[in-house]
Image (cartoon, rainbow, N blue to C red):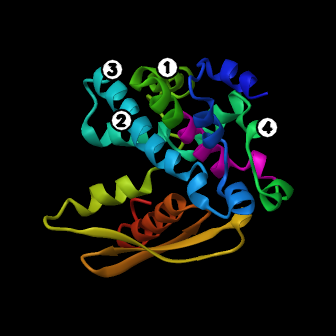
Amino acid sequence: MIKDLETAIGYRFQNIQLLQNALTHSSYANERWHNSLLSNERLEFLGDSILGMLVAEYLFRNFPDRPEGELTRMRADMVCEQTLAAAANKIGVGEHLLLGHGEERFGGRSRNSILADAMESIIAACFLDGGISAALKVVQQFILVEVPVKRLHNVDYKTQLQELVQQKKNQVLSYVLVGESGPDHDKQFDVEVSLNGTVVGSGSGSSKKRAEQSAAASAIGKLFPDKK
């Protein structure tokens, strides 16, 4: 069955355990082995950086007339949860995921956050197995197929807030996780964003990234209401 996923990805693994690890959600690892380190979270961490670098290089080379801020927004749009989940759906990642009973019951196979994390993990697995060329092949096939040249469908509030505050010198933004709640299949993260040590916004989301985006949007609404 996992061979079908290899075919969909377009890459044959020398070490198939890397792909299996990329499909292992923390809920499954905790239930079966009581060890979240055996889940795909470490691969997701690596895949996020690899994906960001490959997309950044592509945009840098192909859009020489675009300024840094616009390239940053384009990259954010191409590596967002929505884009990654769509790519995962194209190759049927959901049906191959290893999930705990709770995630299985509550629709984890179709949850965008889980699919997006798995897609980043697969990119990392390809990198570890076949090097940067293997990872690039996957990114080219499933991520670089729709470049948001004109209209961005995913607003990167963190980047927008950073650009707005940097209009003045010596401005420091920081994001702090202040709480998390809920079961593994429906986690909620709470984040505060501070400007020069003063809390200027707060937000919640199903992942730390989404909570940070929500906090940034809140800060923009408070500090720059005309820009929201």
> Disc 4 to disc 1, how far (Cα)?
22 Å
- Residue 62 badge: 3
* Spatial separation of the CA atoms under disc 2 and disc 1: 14 Å
Q: Amino acid at mark 1?
A: Lys
Q: Give the distance between the C-alpha atoms of the residues marked 2 and 4, in whole angstroms.
A: 28 Å
The residue mark sitting in front, 2 or 4, is 4
Q: Seen from this angle, which residue lies furthest left?
A: 169
Of residues 210 and 88, the one drawn nearer to the viewer in this rendering: 88
Task: Report the mark closest to the observer, 3 or 4.
Answer: 4
Question: Could you say which disc has been placed on residue 95 in the image?
Answer: 4
Spatial CA distance of label 3 from label 2 is 14 Å
Amino acid bearing label 4? Glu
Residue with the mark numbered 1: 137
Question: Which residues are the magenta region?
Answer: 107-122
Q: Quadrant of residue 95?
A: top right
Q: What residue does disc 2 label?
A: 53
Give the mark nearer the N terminus: 3 vs 2: 2
Q: Is residue 45 magenta?
A: no
Relative to residue 184, is residue 149 depicted above or below? above
Tag 3–tag 2 contact (CB < 8 Å): no
Secondary structure under the numbered disc 2 in the rendered image? helix
Left or right, 110 with respect to 167, comes to right
Measured from the top left, where is residue 56 in percent x and y?
34, 33
Which residue is pictured at 55% across the width and 41% down the height? 121
Q: What secondary structure predominates along the stretch shown in magenta?
A: helix
Q: Amino acid at mark 3?
A: Asn
